Image (cartoon, grey):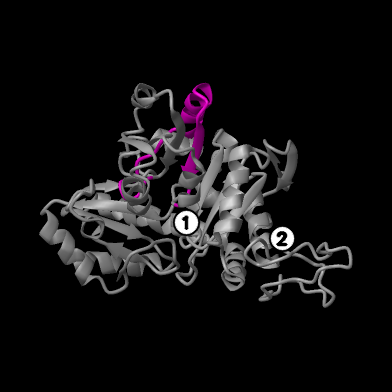
Amino acid sequence: MGIFVYNFHTKQFVMRAETLAIHASNINTASTGDVITPISLSTTFLRGEDGGYPGGFSYSRANSPNRAALESVLTALEYGQDACAFSSGNTAGMSVFQALPPGSHIIAPDDMYWGLKKQLETIFASSLQVDFIDQTDLGNIEAHIKDNTRLIWIETPSNPLLKLTDIAAIAAIAKHHGALLVCDNTFASPVLQNPLNLGADMVLHSITKYIGGHSDVLGGALITADKDSEFWNAIRNIQQTGGAVATPFDCFLTIRSIKTLSYRIKGHCYNAGQLTHYLSHHPKVEAVLYPGLSSHPQHALARKQMKDFGGMFAFLLKDGEATARSVVNKTKLFIQATSLGGVESLIEHRASVEGPDTKTPAHLVRISVGLEHIDDLIEDLEQALQ
């Protein structure tokens, strides 16, 4: 087998994810010959005699060496043309909504990540129109297209119901109606799924999750298939003028984490596969929501558009909400905490986090599987379920 994979946007062969993750961010132009990109904490940069910036950077809100390195590797991993790194996943998502003309209509998933859904329902309630719908039904998407539909937002797999949307099929719908397709790819990561190669216009990541991977970095990113589009230029302006950018140290930490991303994801997937198999046969479990199980209604779609099935899943308890709350309080290795994608396993009663308007069932427990030994994780869940 060759060492390169084809990039549909640049029409070139590029290195595979494991190699890109290690080498795409390395900048070897420093006079000291650093193999790893050093941290550049300067907020301002030297101007030349002609008033230009010979080093390529002017002011750290607009651009900086560490952010440029991070954006470069994210662009490569998603096979895009450009990337913008932000201070959080929410600010990355917000920049998309800010870049839309007032009065634009958005089609979003009915189980959209609650933080971004709250933005649309509160911050943008007076300027944007939104329909939150079940996107697993392509006819339902077609039925909600309006003359002013400018954006279809998808999230696959979704949080926390692990529903999948057909990226290629919805990309065709969006293109036919002149709308943009943005895919929240946080659960899958660039290692398992590349929406731009399936026709999406833009990808969002909460860097805080799998890309950061160690629960110590807050960040977000957008990657585009067209760096010259008017919409992307608007987002870049929002990033640089608005100033909600990732700090140099956070960029440095994220690049460090990306170097092990592919191998961490393999461990997350293995542990999730073993745990979901165990839970699907447990007498106290009503159902397990994980695209890697043949029982998942969209398992075939998962096999089609994902390389593996990820480290996130949820399960429903037969005895209801009280049992679900009890289980999350009894685990010893699984930490009861919000967020996901870290090396440590997390467990959460998601409905209580999202509030009274949530669509998440009250007897659902969400799990982010870490990299602990699988036998220890199974034993911990077993004692909690007892």
Q: Where residue 339 sits: x, y (%)?
A: 37, 63
Label 2, on which residue?
23
Picture quadrant where residue 333 is located: bottom left
> Is 343 placed left or right of 1 in the picture?
left
| Figure quadrant of the C terminus | bottom left
Instruction: Reply yes or no: does residue 267 show up in magenta.
Output: no
Q: Is residue 60 above or below residue 147?
A: below
Q: Residues within 10 Å of mark 1 (few under 14, many from 20)?
A: many
Instruction: Reply yes or no: does residue 165 show up in magenta.
Output: yes
Q: Where residue 232 sits: x, y (%)?
A: 60, 43
Looking at the rendering, the stretch of residues picked out in magenta corresponds to 158-186
Three-letter residue code for mark 1: Thr
The image's mark for residue 91 is 1
Question: What is the distance, in whole Å, between disc 1 and disc 2 at their CAs?
Answer: 27 Å
Q: Is residue 19 above or below residue 297?
A: below
Mark with earlier residue (1, 2): 2
Q: At x 40% / y 24%, what residue is drawn?
A: 146
